[in-house]
Image (spheres, rainbow, N blue to C red):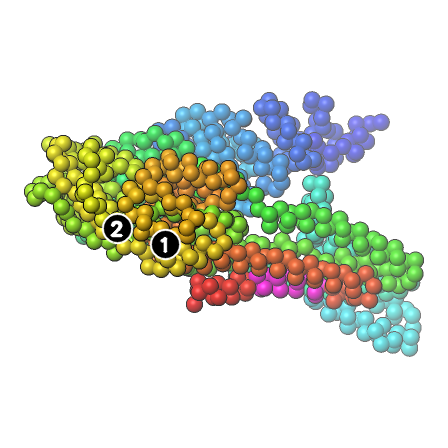
Amino acid sequence: MSKTAIAAKVSCFHCGDKIASSPILFDEKSFCCQGCQGVYELLSHSNLCDYYAISDNPGLAQKNPVSKVKFAYLEDEEIQKQLIDFKDQKISRIAFHVPTMHCSSCIWLLESLYKIDKGIGHCRVDFLKKQLSISFNHHETSLRKIVELLSSLGYEPTLSLSHLEETKKVSNNNQLLYQVGVAGFCFGNIMLISFPEYFGLDSLSHKTFSRLFGYLNMGLALPVFLYSAQSYFKSAYQSLRKGIINIDFPLALGILVMFFRSSYEVISHSGIGFFDTLAGLVFFLLIGKWVQQRTFDTLSFERDYKSYFPVAVAVLKEGKEQTVPVTKLKVGDRMLIRNQEIIPADAILLNGEAKIDFSFVTGESLPVDKVLGEMIYAGGRQTSAAIELEVCKPVSQSYLTQLWNSEHFTKDRESQIITFQSVVSRYFTFALLGIAITSAIFWLLFDPSRSLAAFTAVLIIACPCALALSSPFALGNALRMFGRAKFYLKSPEVIEQMAKTNHMVFDKTGTITNAAQATISFIGADLTKEENEAIFTIANNSVHPLSKKIASYLDLHNIGNAGLSNFKELTGKGVSAQFGKSEVRLGSANFLSISSFEPNADVLASYVGVSINGDYKGFFKISHAYREGLKEVIDSLALNRELSLLSGDNNAEEARLKAFFPKDSTLLFQQSPSEKLLYINQLKENGQQVVMIGDGLNDAGALKAANIGISVTEDTANFSPSSDVIMDAMVFNQLPKFFQYAKDTVKVIRMSFVVSLLYNLVGLSFAVTGTMSPIVAAILMPLSSISVISFTTAATWLYARKRSLVL
């Protein structure tokens, strides 16, 4: 047998394309071109041939490889600055849009790039967005080399120098509309030509006309079959290539069977076929797809979710400090970033000592020193005294969202809803094909005239789309409702987790106490002007609620950081710094090495001692007020879950707090951050689903360890990536409603599953009888998806109104 004859039966090992001429043989495998062989050699050399084991022929054809010269412009530093999200002395980060990724093999290979290029550190794929995030060592590789590598593998990224991320993406439905128009035109004309057949008038004319009309109908059906229905055939073919059967496969099969059956009848003169049904079927399917796409675009929640993401920052305008949302930051604005605050936008350091912790970006927690005039990338956290920066690049809200969802803060959560959905989707099509074939065989034996109608109606009317859409639309709309109520969630999965929690742990200071209503006084020796300035400057550089209260009390905002050095803040203890020639310490009694501040301490007060050059000067007494509605909140939450309180203060307030909490609640005092973390882990080991509610400062570890971590903040500048939820302190009294609404949302999803399953059962029961027209089935199929989307959206909104989350 000749090589050409052999090649006709051979597919490319890499991309799966048929080899029309002599194959290129390498390593006992056949390739269609040098490009595909080159990719295989690269993967084989890097021990990445498991790529071919995950899916058959997963690669993309390399017959027209991209010229490497094309990416020479990526060597330009100005262009790199526009594309790269983060860069320090060693590590750079960038996110690519890779439109050609299409299967599990793609994900596996793209997340294994570090095995090919040793300079690449971490790769992460977001398949739904077709996005690839890469961290790389720019001393060992370069942006150009990475893009060239991606292109050589068939995954050329789309590079855009535009940073207008919030521009809404409008779906281009022009081709779909053209397909609808062609199908509608042909459907109308086929019905017009078929009128004599419908009314039996063909018997009055010569059979030649009946045959002519049959051929005319077949000619009009061809554009519908070849053009309007092509998306169903392409989708079915691609799914078969990947070894799976998707929902478009039975639709494509029904259209295929109907066309060839009708063509056979016309050519054999045994009838005029079902071309009117075929054209009507495609027309109504496309109308349903268009309406569904429009509905999805209208209700799309991702951009709303980002716009509700709460981060604010202090900006200096005419020497006065103002808090503004990061979405309103402009290039040239002067930001004030205090200790432990995150820098929300790329900026240039203008004033202060910058020690930046980039662990949220790189995973490395060692602070990096920055000098005046140096650019600092968004995502870094200041770990020293307050600094002033000038914004030099528009803020990226989606980049901050990406940081919040960084792998450093992810939690293992198995979603029962998504698991159920995946199982249903996996077996739905197989069950559908089995029912369709069984129905066709049954009617073929007892009433052949119903066989084709039953087969096609079953394939068309059943639709798992409603099952697939119910969860994302319900959770997405719930995210919007939560956001409008100032309760900001990291991801949709948090909603399902909230519905399952059974133990809630509260922090005290700044969580159940209201810092805004606290009163403050200083008790001790008279302080000089210089001492007051020193205390104010140090307190003003801290983000702790007590420090903020002291700075507000002293109110010396015309003083900068001149003379401040060696600023240190010890979590749960206090702050210290050098101010001029004085060493100043603010903090607890233990931090100042004294026994106590007051013999008869007020149970509703916190104390911050002052020591200057080792000389104890006195203390600030901050008298707290509990948050409004605290008793009602705790009583409501205690109905179906256990409650605990963890406080870093002493137990002087224990008796008063016991009046708020149920008798079986655990109240622990003088708890360090590590002890809070230990307590959370012990609860989880005992099988508890734990919620931790804190201020995100002294309890970041506990927030991260809990199943759900809720950070309560007086203003949204204190962004805490460790938490799953950021809650505005103003809505603390609505906490029980938020958890009830999470249960309502899960209930809506389950109800929508039931509605969808009932629709499929009822629809199939009619379809298998052979009495339902395929056109009617085509109308009902998209209506089911639209009705489920409408139901979940309306139901989540109504439940939100019921819980008073929206007006």
Q: Which residues are magenta?
A: 778-792
Q: Residue at x 41, y 52 (%)?
A: 662
| Nearest the eye: 7 or 141 | 141
Vertical relation: 750 (above or below) 341: below
Vertical relation: 647 (above or below) 117: below
| Nearest the eye: 770 or 277 | 770
Q: Is residue 300 left or right of residue 547?
A: right
Q: Is residue 781 located in the magenta-colored stretch of the structure?
A: yes
Q: Residue at x 48, y 32 (%)?
A: 122
Q: How many C-alpha atoms fall within 10 Å of the one at disc 2: few (<14), some, or many (≥20)?
A: some
Q: Residue at x 39, y 31 (%)?
A: 364
Q: Residue at x 47, y 35 (%)?
A: 134
Residue at the disc numbered 2: 604
Provide the secondary structure element on which disc 2 rests.
Answer: loop
Vertical relation: 606 (above or below) 384: below
Residue at the disc numbered 1: 660
